[in-house]
Amino acid sequence: MRDTTFVEDASRVRKNPNIVARLRSLAYNLLRARGNENIKNARWRAGLDINQLVKIAELY
C-alpha cells in the first residue's frame, strides 16, 4: 500500500530510509484511523488545507 500511495520506489532518500518508511507508515495509519478509505485523496486534501491536516494529527 505504501508503494502505490506514497510512491516509495521513486524515493531519493538514501540515508536512513527506514526512518522515512516509518513516518510514511505512521501517516498511513493516522489516515486509516480517521476513517479515510481513499488514502491518496486524503493526503491530497491534507496538503491543501491546514485545518484538515490538524484534524488528522489530533491525538485521541
Image: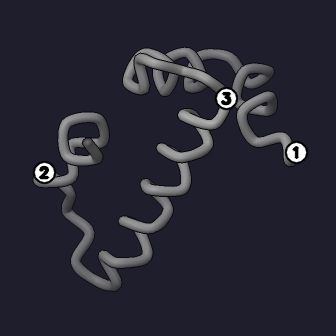
Q: Residues within 10 Å of mark 3 (few under 14, many from 20)?
A: few
Marks 2 and 3: which is nearer the front? 3
Percent coordinates x, y for residue 24 in the rendering = 43, 54
Name the residue carrying label 2: 10
Q: Residue at x 63, y 37 (%)?
A: 33
Name the residue carrying label 1: 60
Secondary element at image label 3 = loop
Real-space CA distance between mark 1 and mark 2, rounded to the nearest whole angstrom: 33 Å
Residue kind at label 3, given as amino acid type: Arg
Q: Residue at x 70, y 30 (%)?
A: 53
Residue 18: image quadrant is bottom left
Residue kind at label 1, given as amino acid type: Tyr
| Residue 51 to residue 60: above or below | above
Secondary element at image label 2 = helix
Secondary element at image label 1 = loop
Q: Are marks 3 and 1 in contact (CB under 8 Å)?
A: no
Apparent side of residue 36 relative to residue 60 in the rendered image (left or right): left
Q: Residues within 10 Å of mark 1 (few under 14, many from 20)?
A: few
Marks 1 and 2: which is nearer the front? 1
Q: Nearer the viewer, residue 49 or 23?
A: 23
Q: Are marks 2 and 3 in contact (CB under 8 Å)?
A: no
Residue kind at label 2, given as amino acid type: Ala
* Quarter of the image with the N terminus in it: top left
Please report whichever mark, 3 or 1, sits nearer to the chain's N-terminal start: 3
Real-space CA distance between mark 3 and mark 1, rounded to the nearest whole angstrom: 10 Å
Q: Residue 34: which disc? A: 3
Residue 9: image quadrant is bottom left
| Residue 33 to residue 2: above or below | above
Percent coordinates x, y for residue 4 in the rendering = 19, 36
